[in-house]
Amino acid sequence: MSYTFKIIEKERINDVIPLVQKLNEDKIPYAILEQRFSEMITQNYECAVIYDDDKLIGVTGLWFCTRHYSGKSVEPDHVYIDDAYRGQGIGKQFFQWIYNYVLEKGYESVELNTYVSNYASHKFYYNEGFSILGYHFLKKL
């Protein structure tokens, strides 16, 4: 099967919300995600997606910045591939596409966060050559 990897057009950003809701187990209402995505697309954010023909099956946000310790960096954010498509090597293909895409844009590193309970993602990122540098903390105000 041939999949299409691309950056989704800003005017189609809401197409990704159903997948993001699955990722977050429907804990964040559609309207809130809609409002947040409308803000995010005005920042250093792009959204990479995977299509199987016309069906949207995968998504990740890409946050672009420059950091003192890693240089020009991109952070894939909330990677999700539909359950029916997992275990087929699509994640590896998706990340290879991301690496090529960001290299063409002049970026030199990729860093990301993953939930401590998401053991499958830990194995995936280790196999992709990522190293653990620290902990991610969050405080809601």
Image (cartoon, rainbow, N blue to C red):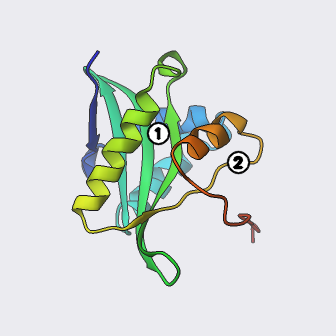
The residue under the point 50% across, 25% down is 82
The residue under the point 49% across, 32% down is 18
The image quadrant where one finds the C terminus is: bottom right
Q: Which label number is shown at residue 17?
A: 1
Q: Can residue 56 be spotted in the picture?
A: yes
Q: Which label number is shown at residue 56?
A: none
Residue toward you, 126 or 101: 126
Residue toward you, 35 or 100: 100
The image quadrant where one finds the N terminus is: top left
Quarter of the figure with residue 28: top right
Q: Which label number is shown at residue 115?
A: 2
Instruction: Look at label 1 and name its amino acid.
Output: Ile
Quarter of the figure with residue 137: bottom right
Quarter of the figure with residue 38: bottom left
Judged left or right of residue 81, residue 26 is right
Local secondary structure at mark 1: helix
Judged left or right of residue 122, residue 18 is left
The residue under the point 24% across, 47% down is 9
Local secondary structure at mark 2: loop
Residue toward you, 96 or 19: 96
Q: Position of residue 69 (x, y in %)?
A: 53, 80
Q: Position of residue 96 (x, y in %)?
A: 35, 43
Judged left or right of residue 43, residue 133 is right
Q: Residues within 10 Å of mark 2 (few under 14, many from 20)?
A: few
Q: Can residue 15 be spotted in the picture?
A: no
